[in-house]
Image (cartoon, coloured by chain):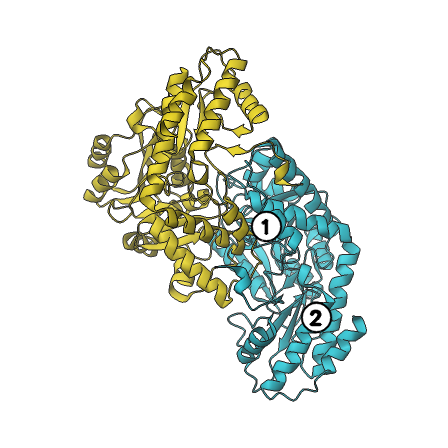
Chain colours: A yellow, B cyan
């Protein structure tokens, strides 16, 4: 069975995204031994390059698992039983952190916001003033199911005033939207390989501050010798150039190749490209007569556009037509939001103007086919202004 | 940086092993969405094929992580605090299970054997008779650091007489040495992608019996919504064709391709090939004047040959010469065994007679260079008998 059998030529989902030919080529490099000098060198080089994309000089580990491993680990490694965590919840992934906190013995203090709004830093301050014993805070930079970007810088700065450890899920933003773990006081910043880093799903790079390492070591029983352990990576790779187990050799090749492309383009250009594609898609969507899910354009994400499903429209049928007739894959909502949203991803290698053009053209045609009143070309015209 | 820069042309280590061109090609298939019909079909097909290599009709999950994730999870998912586990320990991975048991709240009853001997089923019976409250037993099919195969069938049959759940680490044997989870009463049988399955490191396929699922569901708090959870895979994939998180799309392509090659060759032929290569290497090693680590040839593994380092020989230098001059990578011992062993892996795609020939020729030449008294051709002559 070959992937090439797929009708999909435009992977416009919130991950996994399209992987470039160069990265796919690197992925298929002959497998070498993880303790060969070549692999140690590759892993060192990759880590240093990923740090540049993270814009950080902090320690960086590459957890060998999907991004949710990093999310769960960020909580599991720091909590002692009963520790209070402020969970900022304005989307499904925001809420999800609460499950991890409870599963690992912590107590959740939840700051819930409407799922079409961003977290308000003033409310964070109020919550921290009310709960002086909060140990850590979790927040999602960009919650893919709702396509909203939170003001991470302001939130983390406030947390630091209260001596609270900051955990940021930037899985679907880092590498597409500016984020600065060092300047913005982010203690644990988690990313995933299959979003803006344009790699296959498999890896979770994470930057970790000195304060976070200390909290992990100060845990009553530090989490060691576990797939969830972060300190295992420090004790092996960072301190001794060993690995806690056999790392994903092929996926590291891919990550190296992809990150090299990102750095070659230059981070400011990469962020500008994401912004441009996102603006174009938002303009087009509104011109077509659809409504964005976020309460305002200012908080709409530059990596995912969440769109309200118009009343009476079968969005599953809409997406099926786009996929089958035009080869463009977009996605629906996630469970629990009630079928109100469909989403266009524009992340990493998929965030291109030609992809945006084809996606909007396909959207128009598919909407027409299901009898939504659309003027063909109205969205495309907007895209062309940016093209 | 390209893997092809490596001088190593023969990856004769106990994993990762060589990956075939067909599998590497599949690995670099365009990334598709995990909920596209094509991927669901690929995942179904792959799971069914892996079941054939497992020779099982039980449920099979593919955990998205290195094999140690499967090992830790097998214990983490079943234990309640204080539950007693009989840990069969005749090698480092055998011992390792004890750490997982303790980390996840269990109590270890350790049956320790010399690291050059196999586990004696009679001793297992005696231990189970002495400890009537044992809930589960862990055993390694083939402990790579010592190259010894344990009598899994006898051990698990005895465990079942006592109603004890059986957990078998067959990471470095399954797909190279016969194992039958159904006929041999193995409740949880764990494998890894980078050993005899000849894939890159990244995946851990695991067969799970009804009794094991029941024990997981009967746990005081079933382990759910965690990277370590096995029931998450059941609740999502097995019951609903969903995934607990984004699976490793590319690695699944590779696994499908590699397993297809294994099934095409036919399992009896695959096992026979491993046996033949192992016998040839054992004959050659002894003809050269080296001694096998296992106390007898009967228990020596067909996937890894562990060899005693002769007195006065610097095995690191030996291995370096083999790697740099002849492009053959073998490995040393693992920490704690005290530099007494070096090892030749002959697993999966690396288990070939031509690889064996080059490896033994390189070993002879390297031994000569470091002044070990070796008659050049003495080992090669043995290999030629099987060639």
Q: Is residue A348 above or below residue B103?
A: above
Instruction: Report the residue at 57% width, 52% height from top.
Output: A28
Q: Quadrant of residue A86?
A: top left
Q: Residues within 10 Å of mark 1 (few under 14, many from 20)?
A: many
Q: Quadrant of residue B342?
A: bottom right
Instruction: Report the residue at 70% width, 82% height from top.
Output: B288
Asked whether, in this view, residue A346 is left or right of residue B278, the answer is: left
Chain containing the residue with disc 2: B
Q: Nearer the viewer, mark 2 or mark 1?
A: 2
Chain containing the residue with disc 1: B
Of residues B223 and A147, which is closer to you in this image? A147
Can you identify the residue that label 2 sits on? B356
x and y percentages locating residue A212 in the rendered image: 31, 51
Can you identify the residue that label 1 sits on? B204
Q: Secondary structure at mark 1?
A: strand
Of residues A71 and A58, which is closer to you in this image? A58
Residue A166 visible in rendering: yes
Q: Is residue B194 above or below residue B310?
A: above
* Quadrant including the C terminus of chain A: top left
Q: Is residue A95 above or below residue A311?
A: below
Residue B69 visible in rendering: no
Label total for image: 2
Q: Is residue B5 above or below residue A205?
A: below
Q: Secondary structure at mark 2?
A: helix
x and y percentages locating residue B85 in the rendered image: 57, 55
Q: Quadrant of residue A137?
A: top left
Whole-number angstrom distance, CA of label 2 to CA of label 1:
27 Å
Tell me, yes or no, whether the two marked residues, 2 and 1, touch with CB atoms within 8 Å.
no
x and y percentages locating residue B220 in the rendered image: 51, 40
First in sequence: mark 2 vs mark 1: 1
Of residues B81 and A81, which is closer to you in this image? A81
Asked whether, in this view, residue A277 is left or right of residue B233, the answer is: left
């Amino acid at each position: 069975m070959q992937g090439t059998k797929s009708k999909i030529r435009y992977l416009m989902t919130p991950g996994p995204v399209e992987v470039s030919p160069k990265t796919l080529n690197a992925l298929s490099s002959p497998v070498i031994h993880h303790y060969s000098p070549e692999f140690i060198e590759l892993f060192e080089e990759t880590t240093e390059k990923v740090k540049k994309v993270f814009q950080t000089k902090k320690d960086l580990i590459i957890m060998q698992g999907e991004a949710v491993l990093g999310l769960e680990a960020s909580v599991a490694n720091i909590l002692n039983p009963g520790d209070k965590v402020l969970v900022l919840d304005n989307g499904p992934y925001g809420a999800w952190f609460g499950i991890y906190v409870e599963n690992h013995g912590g107590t959740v203090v939840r700051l819930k916001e409407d799922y079409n709004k961003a977290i308000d830093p003033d409310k964070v301050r109020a919550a921290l003033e009310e709960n002086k014993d909060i140990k850590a805070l979790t927040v999602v930079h960009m919650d893919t199911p709702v396509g909203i970007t939170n003001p991470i810088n302001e939130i983390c700065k406030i947390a630091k005033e209260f001596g609270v450890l900051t955990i940021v899920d930037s899985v679907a933003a880092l590498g597409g939207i500016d984020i600065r773990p060092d300047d913005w006081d982010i203690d644990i910043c988690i990313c995933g390989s299959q979003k803006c880093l344009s790699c296959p799903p498999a890896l979770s790079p994470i930057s970790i501050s000195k304060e976070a390492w200390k909290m992990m070591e100060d845990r009553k029983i530090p989490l060691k010798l576990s797939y969830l352990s972060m300190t295992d990576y420090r004790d092996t790779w960072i301190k001794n150039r060993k690995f806690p187990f056999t790392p994903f050799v092929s996926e590291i090749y891919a990550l190296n190749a992809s990150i090299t492309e990102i750095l070659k383009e230059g981070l400011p250009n990469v962020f500008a490209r994401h912004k441009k594609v996102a603006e174009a898609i938002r303009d087009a969507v509104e011109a077509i007569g659809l409504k964005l899910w976020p309460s305002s354009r200012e908080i709409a994400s530059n990596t995912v556009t969440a769109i309200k499903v118009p009343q009476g429209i079968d969005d599953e049928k809409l997406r099926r037509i786009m996929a089958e007739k035009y080869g463009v894959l977009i996605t629906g909502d996630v469970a629990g939001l009630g079928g109100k949203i469909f989403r266009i991803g524009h992340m990493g290698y998929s965030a291109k103007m030609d992809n945006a053009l084809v996606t909007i053209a396909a959207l128009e045609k598919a909407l027409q086919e299901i009898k939504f009143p659309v003027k063909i070309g109205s969205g495309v015209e907007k895209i062309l202004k940016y093209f």
